[in-house]
Image (tube, helix red, strand yellow):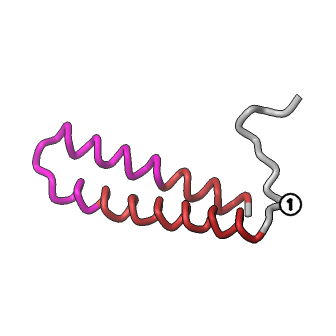
Amino acid sequence: MAHLNQVDLTNLTQQELQNLRHIIDGHKTMVAKLSDYASRCEDRQVKEMFKQAAQSAKTTVDQLTNKL
């Protein structure tokens, strides 16, 4: 039985690939912005929130990129 979060990305249409690239690029932008916010933030809790959000977006980028 396949895991629910496993998706076969081997037979994607050109439109689906383009959409995935758009999602990946958006997440890369989020990583950069959230990391920048974290570096500028003085409140420890808010800084950590931005860092965790950036790491989550980076994980998504890495996972999607590795599947392509």
Front-most of residues 35 and 4: 4
Q: Which residues are magenta?
A: 36-57
In the displayed structure image, the side of residue 9 where residue 41 appears, left or right? left
In the displayed structure image, the side of residue 19 where residue 34 appears, left or right? left
Q: Position of residue 39 (x, y in %)?
A: 21, 59
Q: Pointer 1: what residue?
A: 11
Secondary structure at badge 1 equals loop
Front-most of residues 5 and 19: 19
Q: Quadrant of the C terminus?
A: bottom right
Q: Position of residue 15 (x, y in %)?
A: 71, 68
- By secondary structure, the bulk of the magenta-drawn segment is best described as helix
Q: Position of residue 56 (x, y in %)?
A: 46, 46
Residue drawn at point x = 40 percent, y = 59 percent:
31
- In the image, residue 14 sits, relative to residue 59, either above or below, namely below
- In the image, residue 40 sits, relative to residue 25, either above or below, namely above
In the displayed structure image, the side of residue 47 where residue 34 appears, left or right? right
Residue drawn at point x = 77 percent, y = 46 percent:
7
Residue 53 lies in magenta, yes or no?
Answer: yes
Residue 21 lies in magenta, yes or no?
Answer: no
Farthest residue toward the front? 15
Q: Quadrant of the N terminus?
A: top right
Q: Position of residue 10 (x, y in %)?
A: 84, 60
Residue drawn at point x = 31 percent, y = 62 percent:
33
Residue drawn at point x = 55 percent, y = 66 percent:
22
Rate crowding at label 1 as few (under 14), some (14 to 19) or many (20 or more) other CA atoms within 10 Å.
Answer: few
